[in-house]
Amino acid sequence: MVQRSDILLMYSGGRNNGSPNRSLGGSISRFIAPSDTLNNLFDIKPESIPRGAPVSGHSPAGISTEYRALYIKNNSRIDTFFDAHVWIEDQFPGSADILIGIPRTNDEQNIVISPASEITGGTFSLKFGDEITSDIEWNTTITILASNIRSALKSFDSLSDVTVTGTVLPGDIWSFAVQFIDSDGNKLQPNLQTFLNSLTFTGSAADISITNVTDGRPINDIAVDIAFGNNAPVGISFEEPTVDSPIFIGHLAPQDNFYIWIERTLVTPAIPEQDDESFTLKIGGASGAGRTSVGLPVTDTGGYDSGYDSGFN
């Protein structure tokens, strides 16, 4: 069962970044964010930032929007955190508005077999991570072959479900779109590989190629980098999720992580004393036998007196 200490808040900015001010996307850091991280996530004091550092500081007046990226990690080595979802609670009126950005796309890969009309029979197998399918029998009906591929992939212990859609393309090509769904959606998946090609043929030898079409996000993906704290991350849409309409992420297997972008917009003259926007970021889910619901509250007062609480509700 996932414990309260298994769900970690970690910086972005690369393996060696230990500063919230430089948590500007990129790969996950090895540093766990301390208890006051969100209190100081945007509390950038110009006199404390080295010259040339990639942070934007405070705007003296008007509207100022800044961004930070953090990672949530299931640090358990044996247990899955089911149905992870994120929302904001207790956002109080202040000098700023808080929005959350988490992209969600299913991983999609494409298997191409050609020349299809010259294949007379035989089998092939696929590799996914450390797992290898049983032999997949050739069939001259593309929908049946698509079903055979799906059944082989679904036999993996590490996969819950995929869809496989076959399409006949010009040039005697059969194309199979493999999309990872259900609890494997929203997740960067290992690339499928051809393990063994034992297809028989007349004329040209049968070729099997596999390409990546769409990277799954955000689980195990890497957040886009931004050069400065006030640069909007490319491709990220922001929203204000609630307990009734949270952002659903999916299942976090042991050691899985996902990134979350936080957008803070100041709407009044912005000095540290006025950065008093307060909100609670919550990560809900289910843990262990019976899928008991749990929650992870994270509080930011934009100031100085409350912090990251890793306790489940």
Image: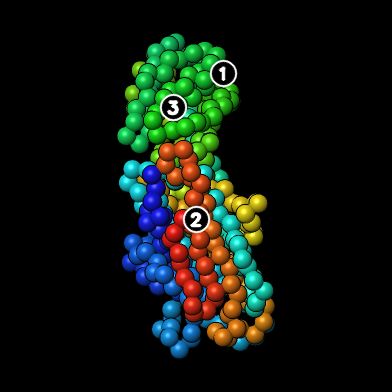
Q: Residue at x 48, y 84 (%)?
A: 45
Q: Residue at x 42, y 42 (%)?
A: 288
- Say whether disc 3 or disc 1 marks the residue closer to the N-terminus: 1
- Specify the amino acid type for callout 3: Leu
- Say whether disc 3 or disc 2 marks the residue closer to the N-terminus: 3
Rendered image quadrant of residue 141: top right
Say whether marks 3 and 1 touch (CB < 8 Å).
no
Q: Which mark is residue 153?
A: 3
Rendered image quadrant of residue 122: top left
Residue picked out by circle 1? 143
Q: Is residue 163 left or right of residue 51?
A: right
Name the one closer to the observer, 228 or 257: 257
**What percent of the width, then of the height, locates residue 174?**
53, 24
**What percent of the width, then of the height, locates residue 112?**
48, 28
Q: Is residue 188 visible?
A: no
Check the image and report above or below for 88 versus 119.
below
Q: Residue at x 40, y 34 (%)?
A: 158
Say whether marks 2 and 1 touch (CB < 8 Å).
no
Q: Residue at x 43, y 86 (%)?
A: 48
Q: CA distance from mark 3 to mark 1?
A: 16 Å
Which element carries disc 1, helix, strand or loop? helix
